[in-house]
Amino acid sequence: MHFTETRPDPAFAGDDAPARRRFCGRCGEPAIDPPAAEEPPPFEQRVCGACGMGVLLRCASDALPGAGGAFLIVDRALRVAAVSEAGEAIFGIEELLVGTDVTELLSSTIGDRALARTVAKAALRPREAVTVPARLTGERADRVGTMAARISTCGPPRAALIAVEPTEFGRLPAR
């Protein structure tokens, strides 16, 4: 991941914040948080203990991608900041995609502008998870078919989490 900010984001802490779960931005593994009755440590671990490669982020419990989940992390400028390991099988190699505009990778039947607005809103402020149909824009589109893309807020620093699951709808059989 290519985030440098480490200041705590008030939208992800405090009594009024929705339940937040930490997960790895590379392997998707949920992080083990201290028991609710215990005071959290003054400085949270930021690197995944499972894979040792990803930055730990927070998201709403219903948006948690899960271990081995395919997802993108997208910044407020709609640029890809990270791709999960499983996401590389769908989207391509992370090193080649970082900095790419997400609209160059995904389109949606809700409209590409509506998809971009939904992602931007999630990257700018805390939002409930929204699931929309999405397709790749490149040559792999027919092999992957339509996916369910769950778009939500994650961070810190705040970004959009786009977790995808293939649906088999619109997928052409392998030749």
Image (cartoon, helix red, strand yellow):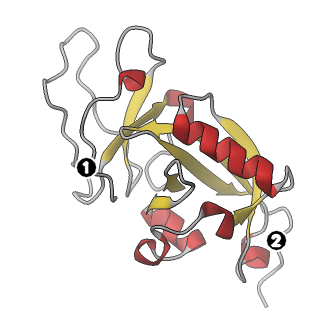
Residue reaching furthest to the left: 42
Residue drawn at (78%, 52%) of the image: 113
* Callout 2 amino acid: Arg
Q: Which mark is residue 48?
A: 1
* Callout 1 amino acid: Cys
* Local SS, label 2: loop
Locate residue 134: give its quadrant. bottom right
Residue drawn at (22%, 57%) of the image: 52
Residue reaching furthest to the front: 77
Residue drawn at (46%, 78%) of the image: 96
Q: Position of residue 104 (x, y in %)?
A: 66, 70
Q: Position of residue 111 (x, y in %)?
A: 84, 53
Residue drawn at (72%, 83%) of the image: 139
Can residue 174 be seen here? The reply is yes
How far apart are labels 2 and 1 at the CA level?
A: 34 Å
116, 134: nearer the viewer: 116
Indicate left or right for 35 with 9 as reference: left
Categorize mark 1 by other alpha carbons within 10 Å: few (<14), some (14-19), many (20+). many
Residue 151, placed above or below residue 100: above
Q: Position of residue 165 (x, y in %)?
A: 66, 55
* Local SS, label 1: loop
Categorize mark 2 by other alpha carbons within 10 Å: few (<14), some (14-19), many (20+). some
Q: Quadrant of the C terminus?
A: bottom right
Indicate left or right for 171 with 87 as reference: right
- Residue ID for mark 2: 171
Can residue 105 be seen here? The reply is no
Q: Which mark is residue 8?
A: none
Mark 2 or 1, which is nearer the eye? 1
Q: Position of residue 154 (x, y in %)?
A: 46, 38
Q: Quadrant of the N terminus?
A: bottom left
Residue 88, placed above or below residue 51: below
